[in-house]
Amino acid sequence: MSKHFVEINTVYEGSLRCRATHGPSGTQLITDPPVDNQGKGESFSPTDLVATALGACMATIMGIYAERHAVDLRGMSVRVRKEMVTAPVRRIGKLAVEIRAPISSNHPHREALERAALSCPVHQSVHPDIELPVEFFWEG
């Protein structure tokens, strides 16, 4: 099995802010904790990035399937609502996903697109203690 790796380098800048650099592209992003966890809430928090990764991954895997089968998903949206819990430790407790796709519920590729979304690597990597309800809305 081939291993693929990507290096992300993170520098702590002080005041609870971090700057992460994507090795292959050099793209940078800043994280800042939310106000309820001693931060300024001025950027994505690290746990926000988990929710972001989930939504983007599900949309991307659906997009890969759609492109292979000439299905137009332009305008599809994914909303992820992240809920934190504090007991027994502070962590993500729930990632509720809503996917709105611009095709009809009786589209011949609907079920395959749903399977594609649920097979995304981030969805498959989320710890089983995190609630992960996914709703699809077919709006074509």
Image: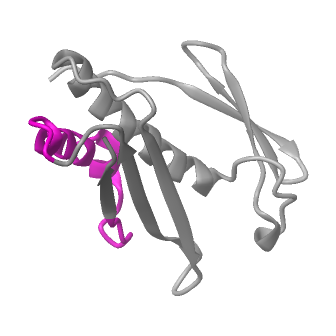
On the rendered structure, is 66 left or right of 56? left
**38 in relation to 66, above or below:** below
Q: Residue drawn at (51%, 52%), measured in percent from left and top?
A: 51
Question: Would you say residue 120 sits in the magenta stretch?
Answer: yes
Q: How is the image coloured?
A: one colour
Q: Residue furthest top?
A: 25
Tally the numbered discs: 0
Residue extent of the magenta highlight: 106-133
Give x and y (percent) for residue 102. Answer: 35, 38
Pinpoint residue 131: horizontal percent, then vertical percent. Answer: 36, 71
Left or right: 1 as drawn, with respect to 15? left
Picture coordinates of residue 35 (x, y %)?
82, 67
- In which quarter of the view is residue 115 placed? top left
User: Seen in the image, is 56 located left or right of residue 109?
Assistant: right
Residue 126: image location, x then y, percent? 35, 56
Foreground: 42 or 136?
136
Q: Quadrant of the C terminus?
A: top left
At x 61%, y 53%, the residue is: 48
Residue 111 located within the stretch drawn in magenta:
yes
Q: Is residue 108 above or below residue 126?
A: above
- Front position in the image: 63 or 84: 63
In depth, the one of 135 and 3 nearer the eye is 135
Considering only vertical position in the picture, is 92 above or below 74? below
Q: Residue furthest left?
A: 108
Judged from this view, the residue extending furthest toward the bottom is 87
Residue 68: name its quadrant: top left
Q: Quadrant of the N terminus?
A: top left
Q: Is residue 139 above or below residue 61?
A: below
Taking the spot 13% from the left edge, 35% from the top edge, the residue there is 109
